[in-house]
Amino acid sequence: MHSRMNKLVSGIATVIFALSTISCGGGLPVQVKIDDFTMEIDLGAVGGAATEALQSTGVLAATSTTVPEVWPDSLPDISYYMDLTTSPVAVDLTPPPNEGNTNYDAINTASSVISRIDLNRLTLRVEQNTINVPLPYLELQVAPEVDSSPYDRKAWRTIGFIEESEAGAVKDHTFQFIKGGETYLNTQLADDLKEFSIRIRGKLKINTEEFQGLPRGKAVVRLIAVATFYLDVAKGLSIGAEQL
C-alpha cells in the first residue's frame, strides 16, 4: 500500500510539473554546470619511460636512472618525447543519494524526458602548473564506461583539443571539438546512467638544443562544462498519466 501511494504521489507530481511548464517552447531548459573532475599531468611519473627509450637507442647508458639534470656537452643534441596521457578519471553524474552529491539531481529526476542537450561551453582549466616547459597541444578523450581500461584503444575516443601554452601558465583554455566529438559527448550525457571516463592525452617534445634542463613539475587540468538539458513536457505529462 505504501509503495502504491509513493507511485501515485510521484505520478501526480510529474503531471503537475508538466502542466506548469506546458507552455515552454522547445522543452523546459535546465542548465547544469559540471566542474567536479580533474586530471593530473606528472612529469616525474612519466620520466622513467623517456629514460628507458633513450637507453634503448644507446643515447643514455644502461646504468642511467633518469634524464640528466643538465644535458651534457659530451652528448649530441637530440629530441625525445614524454607521454602525457593521464590516468582515467571516472565521471558519474548519477551518484547514489547516500553520497550527498545533489549537483545533478535536476537532470537525473527527469532523465526519461530529456529531449535534447546543448553544450553551451566546455573549457579545460589548467588550474595548477609547476611544469618548467611549455605544455603541448592536448587532447581530451572519452570512454563509455567508468571503468574503461586505459589500454583498450578502441574504447577511447578523442573529442577535441586545446592549444599549447607557456611553461607554468595557469589559465582557461577554450576547447575545440573535432568532427563528431560534441555529438559523442552529448551521447554520454544523454545516457540514463550518465557514467563515462575522461583523460588527457599529449606528447611533449623536448629538444635538448633548446632546453638543456630536466623537464619536471605537475599540472592539474579541470574539466568545466556548462550544458542545457531540455525536458520534453508532453512526454513528462504522458509518463505522469501512466503512473497514475
Image (cartoon, rainbow, N blue to C red):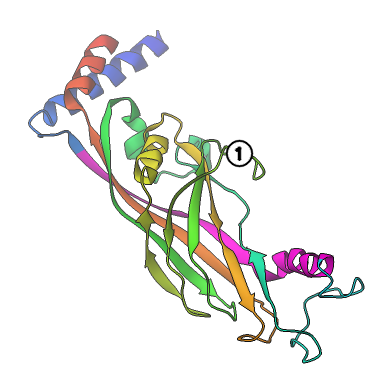
Q: Residue at x 24, y 24 (%)?
A: 13
Q: Residue furthest bottom?
A: 73
The C terminus is located in which quarter? top left
Q: Which residue is most to the left?
A: 23
The boundaries of the magenta stretch are 29-56
Question: Is 197 positioned to the left or the right of 21 in the image?
Answer: right
Residue 151 visible in the picture:
yes
Across and down, in percent, residue 24 comes to 10, 34
Q: Is residue 63 left or right of residue 38?
A: right
Pick whichever, 7 or 202, lies toward us.
Answer: 202
Residue 104 visible in the current orientation: no
Going by the numbered disc 1, the residue's amino acid type is Ser
Front residue of 167 and 40: 167
Residue 37, given in percent of the width and then of the height, sits at: 50, 54
- Residue located beneath label 1 in the image: 148
Name the residue at the top extreme. 1
Task: Please tell me which residue lies in front, 233 or 77.
Answer: 77
Figure disc tally? 1
Horizontal side, residue 142 vs residue 187: left or right: right
Residue 42 located within the stretch drawn in magenta: yes
- Residue lying at the far right in this picture: please name it: 63
User: Residue drawn 53% across and 77% down?
Assistant: 134
Image position of 129 with respect to 11: above or below = below
Give the secondary structure at mark 1: loop
> Looking at the figure, which quarter contains the N terminus?
top left
Classify 10 Å Cα crowding around label 1: few (below 14), some (14-19), many (20 and above): some
Residue 109 percent coordinates (x, y)? 34, 31
Query: Which x, y percent locates residue 75?
Result: 79, 85
Depicted 237 relative to depicted 65: above or below: above
